[in-house]
Image: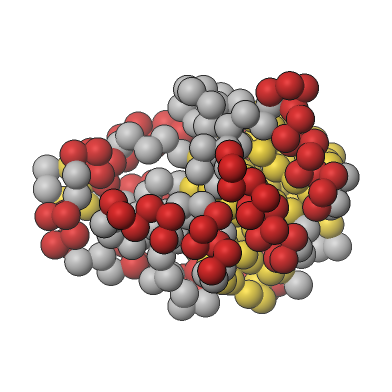
Amino acid sequence: MKLMSYNILDGGKERLPLIIEVIKKEAPDYLTINEANTFAENDSAILKQIAEEIGFPYYDISLSGEYDYHVAVFSKYPFLSINKLQPLMRACIVALVETELGKISIASLHLTPYSENQRHPEINLILDFQKQYKNRVLMGDMNSLSKYDDYNHKIIEGFDEIQTKKFTTDGQLRFDAINKMMAVGYVDSALIMKRNKDATAPTSLNDYLSQTPMRLDYIFISPSLLSHHAHYSVIKNDLTHKASDHFPIIVELK
């Protein structure tokens, strides 16, 4: 079972053909798209286009609580149930799917970018909902840092005002959201493969902003799926450098 999480930046716009090419090359069984802006417009025309072009028979979208930063999901497995959690400033959609590994609850999320304090109630909402299931996945742009990625404290000196509010309090980096997921038992798929220092943003598309490389996109799995974890990677190539400001991430469960 191949999982893919991809923040495509403002709905992809003129980059949509590149994004579709990236997805086709990776051929995931389950895909989460963050910033699926405009996907719900015109009777979900773009949502349906991607599903048809790539060959996903099952798909859905959760609308953002603020602006148009929706979360879309595409699956080769039928949905047994769909829940769109609220309130979130961005969005979260939880799908229960029947797979060769059994039933898995997959929460596709995009946490608020504003501050760690504002992410607290969002992650609490998601974790509380997910705890009813044995096999669980959390995937998406979490706009949060992990303490295990060994960020040098000096990176704060390069932060602009938005990043300072987003990642720090009183001059200290914050790791609360990721800590909370791991405290309740979720396993960081990058960390266990020793790939946690592979940044997921920025790409060449926005390197003019001189942003510090960071890991903002994650796939967490429940302990029940740990024995099936076979692969983690950040997809970095010429195509993904052009397609979005985030690189897609992949996890394979076997």
List x then y, in percent, for residue 242: 51, 58
Count all numbered tags in the image, as a single digit: 0
Question: Which image quadrant for residue 150?
Answer: bottom left
Please state, as top left, top right, bottom left or bottom right, where the N terminus lies in the image: bottom right
List x then y, in percent, for residue 35: 54, 38
Residue drawn at (16%, 54%) of the image: 158
Residue drawn at (39%, 71%) of the image: 197
Tell which of 119 and 89 is nearer to you: 89
Please state, as top left, top right, bottom left or bottom right, where the C terminus lies in the image: bottom right
Question: Which image quadrant for residue 86?
Answer: top right
Residue farthest front in this picture? 14
Residue drawn at (66%, 60%) of the image: 22
List x then y, in percent, for residue 42: 73, 21
Residue drawn at (84%, 57%) of the image: 99
One can see residue 3 in this view: no
In the image, residue 146 above or below residue 130: below
Tell which of 159 and 168 is nearer to you: 159
Residue 242 lies left or right of residue 152; in this view the side is right
Residue 149 lies left or right of residue 245; in this view the side is left
Question: Which image quadrant for residue 243?
Answer: bottom right
Residue 35 lies left or right of residue 72; in this view the side is left
In the image, residue 74 above or below residue 190: above
